[in-house]
Image (cartoon, rainbow, N blue to C red):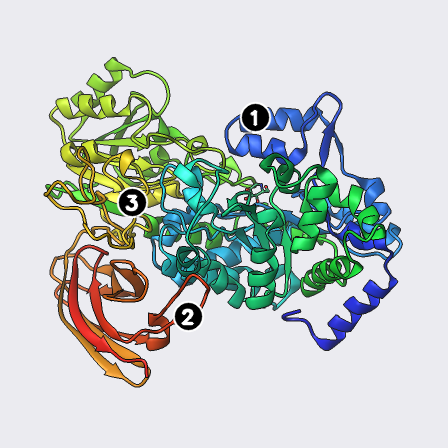
């Protein structure tokens, strides 16, 4: 096990040698508190119902306060539970005490939870934070989440979600780092470092969980849980990449995906779990199923019944069962009848015990009284980090007449119900935040500007209020319209077939524009939206995603110019939904789309995305020049000059792309190979250097052979994936 001392390994082996078969299988069983007495819903599903909007937070609170919960104390006492999903530290200690003091071997429980983009201090959703292109920031926010959750006894995050995702209809694009495997891999590494690497005390780190393994982000038509079929070279060169990077960075656990890949559900996919993950990549930790996924293999039609599904999952290398109890109910018999070997069980139990040992749970199983109180009031350094992350994730999409930045004296009509909400800034998958820590856009704007009046007018749901629209126009020097999606419109089980602004928001914008006042559209959303109309008619557009607890301050400071926007798109935005999936690093066809008829295009949609990957404006302008490519030993040395031509200081994200012009398999028209953020004062010019290792210029074929093929390459550098300088170079790998 990676990261264990010889002594710790010996301790694991000793415990293992003392365990009964039932106790080993107990370690492989993860349960959630079940709600009994009137509610036949497992706790975990109830949480999902709240996070995906089927019930409100208030309803959830009401159910929980009156419900009788079964925390499985008896099973814990008997050594039949290895893990639980609980976040209340008092409960954590209570259950841990049963495991440690009352079960035969005293093996501690591991408490896990969906801490996707922050625990108490919620920071931007991943698709937004990835667009900061700031790996130091990504690491810091993860470290903050680790500390906060560990102080509640949650030592295991079901994060980072590193699914490469290219179809914006899929609601879960919000949870991951976007469409690009290179950016996604850097995101994965940074998150693993932040979550896992600070061992100065056991209270500073948690076990990460790379999910969802694998190719969940390619679910057909962007419909959640849907089937995935893809050529293996596409899988190896794109969808596997982020997991490979995360495993190399030391991720302690992996969660299998719900979907099938080329016909075999990932839950029972021996090729994925054993051959690739454990054997080839050498992943030393344990694999957990997704919620109820073992049982769902019966519905998939790959197992006859629960027992069959459990046997298949265990043999395939699934170490822990999330939520079905199938391992608990059937594996003892399956081992006794010879269907599952004892080695399979030993291996799973060893992996799970090793992660618990690595976490220090055997020596520090409890949450201290002091830790429980530590974050009652959030420390300033946490809220300011959440704000910094929010500011760096905002993307300026359009600023036609330089309406932005706004004067602090301007009379601003702030419009849209989303602007006045502390809940809607949080984004999908966040459970431990508190309203008192949040700053809505309205609150942020009122603090930043002298003359702000709020008019609800309308939102993603419900009707428009004409009187308010007229009043907003009458008051304003400028209208700031906050439109977009509610939290419940992205995340799990929240795919949309049409990804334009929902409800009557387009009409709202039309009416606001008719007032004759300049309109600044601030978008709050969990996915790329199809903004063809908005881009044509609204002069100023700011993509602000769901940015977490300090969203209000971040948006206000960008609008006032206190902060020069520097975020970039981690996913291409389509012009219209029908273009999905649209992504910059697609393979070429023999007939790339053009004006002529017999080319790869739609009759009724633009050829390309509306805003490409890597795109984002600022309050200054950067120009590129002098792209140089030199061959050196084992690498290409590349340099490019970038200059700040405007009047504001800013940070530019310099991006390096490559194209393998002719290869034995069709390669993407461009692939990101590096990026660097550079701070530039007005008039300042810097030369940015990249070293592109030749080893990184290859690709996998369908049998996972890594090929480095001599020939012509194009090297591109620029401020987004579309507007680039280019140099050609012949490369030999001999
Ligand atoms: C289902 C989701 O797919 C997964 O991401 C999450 O970690 C589990 N439920 C547990 O809540």
Left or right of residue 27: residue 188: left
Quadrant occupied by the C terminus: bottom left
Look at 37% across and 61% down and name the residue there.
182
Can residue 314 be seen in the rendering of this structure? Answer: yes
Q: Please name whichever residue, 219 or 70, is drawn nearer the observer in this view of the structure.
A: 219
Q: Label 1, on which residue? A: 58
Where in the figure is residue 602, as x and y percent of width and height? 20, 37
Q: In percent of the image, x 36 and y 18: which residue is there?
A: 462
Q: CA distance from mark 2 to mark 3?
A: 26 Å
In this view, the mark in front (1 or 3): 3
The quadrant where ligand 1 appears is top right
Q: How many residues crowd around disc 2 within 10 Å: few (fewer than 14), some, or many (20 or more)?
A: some
Task: Tell whether 495 sits left or right of 608.
Answer: right
Label 3 Cα crowd, 10 Å radius (few <14 / some 14-19 / many 20+):
many
Q: Are dots 2 and 3 in contact, CB under 8 Å?
A: no
Mark 3 or mark 2, which is nearer the start of the sequence? Answer: 3
Mark 3 highlights which residue? 582
Which residue is label 2 attached to?
A: 706
Q: Residues within 10 Å of mark 1 (few under 14, many from 20)?
A: few
Q: Relative to 269, say whether 533 is above or below.
A: above
């Amino acid at each position: 096990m990676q990261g264990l001392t010889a002594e710790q390994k010996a301790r694991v082996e000793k415990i293992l040698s003392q365990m009964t078969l039932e106790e080993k299988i107990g370690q492989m069983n993860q349960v959630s508190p079940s709600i009994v007495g009137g509610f036949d819903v497992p706790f975990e599903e109830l949480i999902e119902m709240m996070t995906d909007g089927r019930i409100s937070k208030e309803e959830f609170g009401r159910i929980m306060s009156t419900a009788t919960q079964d925390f499985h104390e008896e099973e814990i006492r008997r050594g039949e539970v290895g893990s639980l999903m609980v976040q209340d530290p008092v409960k954590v200690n209570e259950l841990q005490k049963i495991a440690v003091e009352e079960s035969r071997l005293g093996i501690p429980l591991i408490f896990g939870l969906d801490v996707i983009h922050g625990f108490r201090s919620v920071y931007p959703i991943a698709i937004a934070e990835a667009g900061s292109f700031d790996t130091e920031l990504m690491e810091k926010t993860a470290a903050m989440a680790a500390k906060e959750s560990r102080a509640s006894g949650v030592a295991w995050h079901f994060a980072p979600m590193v699914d490469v995702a290219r179809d914006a209809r899929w609601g879960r694009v919000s949870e991951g780092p976007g469409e690009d495997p290179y950016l996604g891999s850097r995101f994965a590494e940074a998150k693993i470092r932040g979550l896992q690497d600070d061992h100065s005390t056991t209270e500073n780190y948690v076990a990460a969980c790379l999910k969802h393994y694998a190719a969940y982000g390619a679910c057909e038509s962007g419909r959640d849980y849907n089937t995935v079929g893809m050529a293996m070279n596409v899988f190896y060169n794109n969808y596997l990449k982020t997991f490979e990077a995360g495993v190399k960075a030391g991720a302690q656990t992996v969660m299998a995906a719900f979907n099938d890949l080329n016909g075999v559900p990932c839950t029972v996919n021996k090729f994925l779990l054993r051959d690739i993950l454990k054997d080839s990549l050498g992943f030393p930790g344990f694999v957990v199923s997704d919620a109820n996924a073992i049982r769902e293999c019966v519905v998939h039609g790959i197992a006859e019944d629960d027992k069959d599904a459990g046997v298949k999952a265990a043999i395939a290398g699934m170490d822990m069962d999330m939520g079905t109890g199938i391992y608990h109910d059937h594996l003892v018999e399956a081992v006794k009848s010879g269907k599952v070997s004892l080695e399979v069980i030993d291996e799973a139990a060893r992996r799970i015990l090793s992660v618990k040992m690595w976490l220090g749970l055997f020596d520090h199983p409890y949450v201290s009284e002091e830790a429980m109180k530590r974050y009652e009031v959030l420390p300033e350094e946490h809220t300011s980090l959440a704000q910094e992350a929010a500011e760096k994730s905002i993307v300026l999409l359009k600023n036609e007449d330089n309406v932005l930045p706004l004067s602090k004296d301007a009379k601003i009509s702030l419009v849209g119900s989303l602007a006045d909400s502390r809940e809607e800034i949080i984004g999908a998958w966040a459970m431990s935040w508190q309203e008192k820590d949040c700053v809505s856009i309205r609150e942020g704007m009122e603090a930043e500007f002298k003359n702000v009046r709020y008019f609800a007018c309308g939102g993603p749901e419900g009707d428009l209020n004409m009187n308010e629209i007229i009043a907003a126009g009458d008051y304003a020097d400028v209208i700031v319209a906050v439109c977009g999606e509610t939290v419940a419109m992205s995340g799990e089980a929240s795919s949309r077939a049409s990804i334009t602004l929902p409800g009557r928001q387009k009409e709202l914008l039309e009416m606001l524009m008719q007032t004759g006042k300049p309109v600044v559209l601030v978008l709050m959303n969990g996915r790329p939206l199809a903004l063809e109309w908005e881009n044509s008619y609204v002069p100023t557009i700011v993509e602000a995603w769901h940015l977490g607890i300090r969203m209000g301050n971040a948006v206000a400071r960008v609008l006032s110019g206190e902060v020069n926007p520097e975020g970039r798109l981690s996913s291409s935005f389509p012009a219209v939904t029908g273009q999905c999936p649209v992504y910059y690093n697609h393979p070429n066809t023999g007939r790339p789309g053009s004006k002529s008829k017999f080319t790869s295009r739609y009759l009724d949609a633009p050829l390309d995305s509306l805003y490409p990957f890597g795109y984002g404006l600022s309050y200054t302008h950067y120009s590129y020049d002098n792209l140089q490519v030199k061959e050196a030993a084992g690498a290409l040395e590349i340099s490019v000059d970038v200059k700040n031509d405007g009047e504001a200081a800013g940070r530019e994200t310099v991006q390096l792309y490559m194209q393998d012009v002719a290869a034995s398999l069709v390669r993407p028209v461009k692939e990101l190979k590096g990026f660097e953020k550079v701070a530039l004062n007005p008039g300042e010019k810097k030369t940015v250097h990249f070293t592109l290792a030749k080893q990184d210029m290859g690709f996998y074929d369908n049998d996972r052979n890594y090929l480095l093929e001599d020939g012509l390459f194009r090297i591109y550098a620029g401020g987004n994936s579309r507007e680039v300088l280019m140099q050609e170079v012949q490369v030999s790998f001999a």
